[in-house]
Image (tube, rainbow, N blue to C red):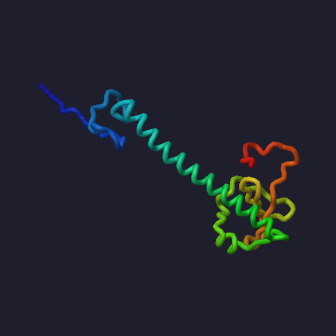
Amino acid sequence: MNTKEPIFYTCPNPECPAPQYIPQRVNQVYCCTSCKNRANYLRNREMLKNRYADLTEMIKADKKLARLMERLPEGKILLRELQLMGIPVDAAMKIAKNETKQGKTHFFSNYGITTTDGSIFYIIKRENYGRPTQGLHQP
């Protein structure tokens, strides 16, 4: 009689009560559906946390730009000043081409910054001219 020992697999769910299991299918990854659902929930929860943090950072940057635009009559600011104020240029919701100044415009929610050479930025306000803002945050 030829008896094979069963091959045990390890469940990738970190909270699995019994991590060693014998698969019933060839492509089975988790030991049971509850472990699969729990692992997917934990993974998606981390993604949502990061998405929420990015959104809050973008809204804070937008509010800082609004305050700066009120104080600066020309709306002109240097990159170093933006960094000191904690406005991350890479947290912009949308990056568009600026046709008039031949540069890029980084839009947050209602405000944005545009540049031509990368060191001097101009704060601009988004004007939608009656068009919908396509899902952007409206205060």
Left/right placement of residue 96 relative to residue 18 reads right
| Quadrant placement of the N terminus | top left
Q: Is residue 1 above or below residue 56?
A: above
User: In which quarter of the view is residue 40 placed?
Assistant: top left
Residue 100, image x, y percentages: 87, 62
Residue 8, image x, y percentages: 25, 36
Instruction: Return the residue nearer the eye: 131 or 105.
Output: 131
Left/right placement of residue 45 relative to residue 23 reads right
Left/right placement of residue 82 relative to residue 31 reads right
Instruction: Return the residue nearer the eye: 23 or 89.
Output: 89
Residue 136, image x, y percentages: 73, 47
Q: Residue at x 76, y 72 (%)?
A: 77
Left/right placement of residue 130 relative to residue 42 reads right
Instruction: Return the residue nearer the eye: 138 or 23.
Output: 138
User: In which quarter of the view is residue 59 placed?
Assistant: bottom right
Residue 93, image x, y percentages: 69, 53
Q: Residue at x 46, y 39 (%)?
A: 41
Q: Residue at x 22, y 32 (%)?
A: 6
Q: Is residue 132 above or below residue 100?
A: above
User: In which quarter of the view is residue 58 placed?
Assistant: bottom right
* Furthest-top residue in this view: 1
